[in-house]
Image (spheres, helix red, strand yellow):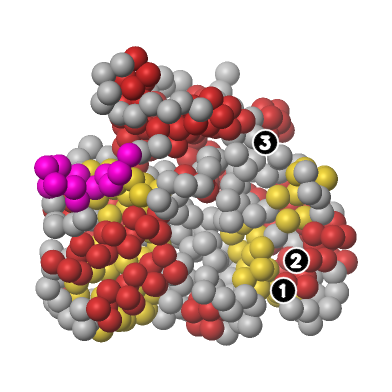
Amino acid sequence: MKEVQENGMFSTDLLDKIREKFLYVNWDPYTGERTYFEASGGSLRLKTVMETMARETALPDELFRFNPASDHVVKAVEKGIEDVKLFLGAKSGVIMAAHSATHAIFRAINAVTTHIPGKNIVTTELEHPAVLSPTKYFAEMHNMEWRCAKISKETSSVPLENILELVDKDTTILAFQHGSNQTGAINDAKYIIEEARKIKPDLYVLVDAVQYAPHGPIDVEDIGADAYAFGPYKAYTVKGIGFAHLSERLAKLPHWNLIGKPDDNWLLGSPAHPMYMAWSVVMDYLGWLGSQFTQSTDKREQVIAAKDAIHSHMKALLHRAMNGTDELAGLRQLDNITPCNMLPEIGNRLGIFLFRVNGMDSSTAIGNFNKKYHIRLGARIKDPYSTVPLEAMGWPDAVRLSAAHYNTPGEIDKLLKAAREIRG
């Protein structure tokens, strides 16, 4: 019998099984017992990922050395790439592996702006510096105008019309997030790309999916971006690698490459095969989770089922946090809490949002949540990561809650009880 999500959430039994598969799900060696709402800083790690990393990192063997250990390494990297394609729904193009998703984004934007003529680059005020920084840097390098679409202060998202009014026939590249790591707002990436290409049909587009990738289904063929980047460390594995799907036309643009390699090769140096194996382990986990919701044995269909179920669970947790329960007031009802620029209709969002404790700076607030209630949250302050969106929204700072599908309604209730008591 397959799982049914009551009120959008995983059943208690399935949540217990999910949480059993992760390390440090409710404690860590430094705090002891704690509730983890910092998935945007890095998700919890799967136990099987860490077991795989420990085993495989010990192997010294390199690719293409024609011995059994080397053959194992080759197969591990090849399978990891195939599993990235499966995750993204990629049937064409090239998978680029890089030190991080940020690194991948810099490389992709560098290739486009160096070889595609134009007079401007378009992005938005809501972006992570992984997009803001390279778009600004390469705009200045190539004497292009750097255009940033304005945030709506009412919704903490960027309206489509604000983006489209900046795109013209001289735009070299449009770059934006699929889902905001600051406010959780999800962009309809496919629709944005379609509308932007009505203005410039051959427009290059890059999508930063680092925050969206763990939470929602992805089909890069349908979305139509030229570069689509994500970071596995926010999807249950470790830091140290990022992946991007590149369209065939972007992949073949001149770029950093090794002599003698194919024109569409983006691999520089020797890959660390444990990173690729760790991603395959994540895909096995998503296949298991998806199998709770579909009869299909097709891995891609299982992954889609898992992502649909994850998105539903996350939306239900967000609704509980904002609106509360019959017994607990939600953040919207608390007189000491101000949620950041979210209309009454939560809409299509990730399980991420910003709020402020009235009369208290957010660094102090997260310290209180941590020390008094053992709840781990993030502070968004005017640093290189958050200054642009905070200033655009008119906030000096904010507390960020970023949940994941292993979080429970009970943990949301714990947050609401704590939020009610913290006063500035």
Quarter of the picture containing the C terminus is: bottom right
Q: Which residues are magenta?
A: 257-270
Q: Check disc 1 and report the residue beneath it.
A: 362
Q: Check disc 3 and report the residue beneath it.
A: 23
For this rendering, which residue is in front, 268 or 294? Answer: 268
Three-letter amino acid code at the position of disc 1? Ser
Q: Is label 2 in a helix, a strand or a loop?
A: helix
Q: Residue furthest top?
A: 68
Residue 366 is labelled as: 2
Whether 393 is among the magenta residues is no
x, y (%) of residue 57?
Answer: 49, 31
In the rendered image, the vertical position of residue 30 relative to residue 309, given as above or below: below
In the rendered image, the vertical position of residue 41 relative to residue 152, given as above or below: above
The residue lying at 37 percent from left, 19 percent from top is 69
Quarter of the picture containing the N terminus is: top right
User: Counting other residues with Cα less than 10 Å from the Cα at mark 1, is it few (<14), some (14-19), or many (20 or more)?
Assistant: many
